[in-house]
Amino acid sequence: MGLRASIRVRRGTHVVDVDLHVADGEAVALVGRNGAGKTTVLEALAGLLPLEEGSIELDDRRIDSLDPERRGVGFAFQDGVLFPRMSARENVAFAARARGERATPARARADRLLEDLAPGVDPAARPAKLSGGERQRIALARTLASEPRLLLLDEPLAAVDASARPGLRTLLRDTLAAFDGPSILVTHDPVEAMTLADRLVLLEDGHVTQVGTPAEVRSHPATRYAADLVGVNLFEGTLEPAASGTGSLRTAEGELTVAWPDGLERVRTPGVRATLAPAEIALHAERPEGSSRNAFHGKVLEVAIGGSRARVRLDTEPPLVAEVTTGSVERMGLTPGTSVWASCKAVEIRLMVQTSGPDTL
Amino acid sequence: MGRRLPLPVLLAALIGGAFVVLPVVGLVARAPWGRFGDVLAGEGARTALRLSLEVSLAATALSVVLGVPLAWVLARREFRGRSVVRALVVLPIVLPPVVAGVGLLEALGRRGLVGGWLDRTFGLQLTFSTAGAIVAATFVSMPLVVLASEAGFRGLDRRFEQAAGVLGASPGYALRRVVLPMVAPQLAAGAVLAWARALGEFGATITFAGNLQGRTQTVPLAVFQELQTDRDGAVALSLVLVVVSVAVLVALRERIMGAG
């Protein structure tokens, strides 16, 4: 069961050669730079690009010679690709109508899906009248309405305003968790990959360079790209209530103070993931004073300079990667071995918790 | 921007503009305004107007029914010799209409390549029949539909068809529900241009279908004949075609192309 694919396609002078195994219910993030071949893999799986060699098996059935409409694959395109001459409702009802279902029940089901996935969107509105985030929600609803056995999402957050991202990210997370077939998410955003996927598949120049859970990739990055990619700080541990609206996230490598997420019951919650952007970490020569509850002492392990910014790896508990200006690096004389303090605000640590548990659904 | 133009350029432009406008002014000046209604209500003019409407609309319908699928194949299927086919398809636009008429005679006339077979098998004769006038008008106007709709198809992001396919739509369903509605403005523009071309068709029609009142004598052919007998009638019918042409231009500009 699940997906077993061995894909070899040529695109111009590039060759994409990828083996993928995704179990039922598992979400895999296909991560790589622009041009690494991520979208090509999705197009091959969906039947939009013929295989040169290889095979695709979905639920123990060969699908690689089938036309796209017969594969049972759902593909949410990068910027939605909603049909502009149809309303949101007609877009979502399209798959059912294409199968010959009558208009009235198809539209009723579309309306119910829209209520769940895009509440507040007028089902009669044309895509041009909607925001990027709303369009992406409708594209997701349209894909799910085709009842696919394999779900493919191509950069689902790329065309969305920063303000609409958190909500959409939560929706994607819930959707992927509820989807019982295999799903593949293409992204070049490490935060997106680590928060949405169970497993990462790193793609460089058409080839897989690493496969593993976010934690595995973070602790043992196989390539320079992997190391750069996981430059984001990821924590996993048990969240415990602490003073006045805060919590304490206890990980195997250290402890952080975080803002207690809205809507989460104030009880001990295991298995919580959190991310911290390196740019949110400030470095100080002396112990910082003031409101930062998170202050860690440690030594510099590595300083990587790129342009006007530098990434500084620290052996603090937990280990951190900070991003500072090259000016700060010079001013503080940061080199491997320098003793520094790192601090960050509790609110900058982003917690990934499902606020809608199974009992509320 | 605000610089003065050299005098010779200005002069040539003025003459050029006058040259384009003058024939229309001539028609308006010499029109038999007093008995305009009588002329158009006359037996010959009425028959020609009705026939022209029928022939041009039938030719437009045929052009769309045959030309849009052809445009789709040219836009979306890759095959050897596609560029040659594309060139041949638009040939009637540049071909002298009388040559088109001779070609149609040799192909579809009673002794033509296919015409003889049509006659023997179905008893169908296109020459000297309204069907022949429709065929001649279709021949010259279909390329306009093909050109306009192929441009529309080629300008359409393929991902719309791909999205429809992945959602379970057959290529035919995707074409009908997704692609055609999206290129509808280009198709309509092509159809209007084709209709205008069919309405004005003269050379191929008179060569292939002949000039028979009530059967193949459309308005342009009637104008040609009236010119020798009743000049007022010719001018009045010509003005009708001028009005239609201006209406087509206005429609294309404001309704279909949306240009300001």
Image (cartoon, coloured by chain):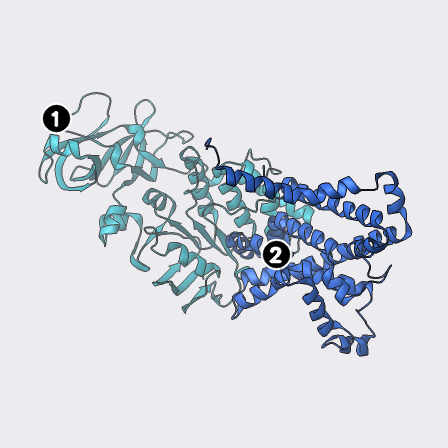
Density class for disc 1 (Cα within 10 Å; few <14, some 14-19, many ≥20) is few
Left or right of A338? Residue A318 is: right
Along the viewing direction, whichever of A296 and B19 lies nearer the viewer: B19
Q: Where is the N terminus of chain A found, in terms of image quarters?
A: bottom left
Chain identifier matching the cyan colour in the rendered picture: A
- Cα distance between the residues tagged 1 and 2: 68 Å
Measuring 89% from the left and 46% from the top, which residue is drawn there?
B41
Q: Is residue B164 above or below residue A13?
A: above
> Which numbered dot is residue A227?
none
Per the image, the residue denoted by label 2 is B175
Q: Are marks 1 and 2 on the same chain?
A: no
Residue B9 position within the rendered picture, expressed as x and y whole percent measured from the top left: 51, 41
Q: Residue at x 64, y 52 (%)?
A: B190
Where does label 1 land, which residue? Answer: A286
Q: Residue B154 versus residue A55: which sits nearer the camera?
A: B154
The chain that hosts pointer 1 is A
Residue at 21 percent across and 20 percent down: it is A290
What secondary structure is found at the residue carrying circle 1?
loop
Q: Would you say residue A99 is visible in this rendering?
A: no
- Residue A23 location (% of width, % of height): 41, 57
Q: Amino acid at mark 1?
A: Glu
Residue farthest along the top direction in this orientation: A290
Instruction: Provide the secondary structure element on which disc 2 rests.
Output: helix
Q: Nearer the viewer, residue A78 or B104?
A: B104
Q: Please give left or right for residue A345 compared with residue B57 in the image.
A: left
Q: Chain of mark 2?
A: B
**Apparent side of residue A78 relative to residue B156 in the rendered image (left or right):** left
Q: Which amino acid, mark 2?
A: Leu
Percent position (x, y) of residue B75? 55, 60
Q: Nearer the viewer, residue A35 or B114?
A: B114
Corner quadrant of residue A278: top left
For chain B, the rendered hue is: blue
